[in-house]
Amino acid sequence: MKRRVVISLLSALALSAFVGITPVAAAASFEETAKTFVDELASQAIHELTDKSVPRAERIKRFRAFFNAHFAVKGIGKWILGRHWRKATQAEQEEYLDLFEDLIIVSYVDRFAAYVGEPLHVHKTLVLNENNATVYSDIHQGGGMETLDVNWRVARKDGVHKIVDVVVEGTSMSSTLRSDFSSIIRQHGGKVSGLIEALREKTASLSGNTH
């Protein structure tokens, strides 16, 4: 159970393409700033979103602010929808993005409160080119449980660091959602409207169960 909670927490961070609004320090190397970015992002999430004493309504407010401040929801949603994005009408695109944000909020706000794991430990950063790097980290769980490997793909553009994906135990969270959403669209005759309806139902169900 604890392992599932940790993965759920990380996947919430991971539902990403483009995380963060953190200026790059000119004097520091990309390797250093990428590591610092991941360290600070994880620390902020654990500090602000896992306090069980905070009322749920306030935790939802904090989570929504955290998500919007550090994740580019439009970029995330467009990549996950893939080629289907171009097939959607403007109205469908707008509703899909709204539902996508709501889905993440209601899916993960309580899972953060249930998190009791160890802090993230960054142990290596591999710079791929001047604007892309992978930060390798892990979580050492107690009780004889296995260590979780978590790899963060960090990009920077115009002095801003962004997470473009998180891979937990070899599984890309962005790719997983992309596959799941594509499957739902296929089940509805290739129509984005089918995914939108499914997201409406799922979001309403989770909201009703977690108020």
Image (cartoon, rainbow, N blue to C red):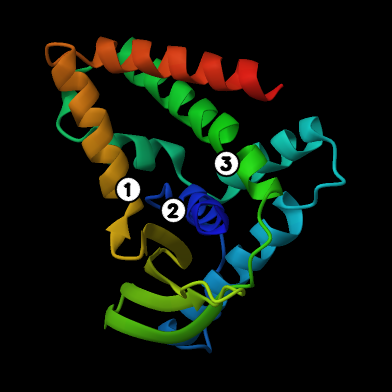
Residue 105, quarter of the rendered image: top right
Q: Residue 174 got which mark?
A: 1
Mark 1 or mark 2, which has the lower sequence index? 2
* Residue 52 x/y as whole percent: 81, 47
Please report contact status of discs 1 and 2: CB closer than 8 Å, yes or no. yes
Closer to the observer: label 3 or label 2?
2
Between residue 187 and residue 22, name the one nearer to us: 187
* Residue 157, above or below 54: below
Q: Quarter of the image containing the C terminus?
A: top right
Closer to the observer: label 3 or label 1?
1
How far apart marks 3 and 1 lie (CA) works out to 17 Å
Q: Residue furthest front?
A: 144
Instruction: Identify the secondary structure beneath mark 1.
Output: helix
How far apart marks 1 and 2 lie (CA) works out to 7 Å
Question: Is residue 8 visible in this depiction of the protein?
Answer: yes
Circle 2 residues within 10 Å: few <14, some 14–19, many ≥20:
many
Residue at numbered disc 3: 68
Amino acid at pointer 3:
Asn
Image point (23%, 22%), residue name: 184
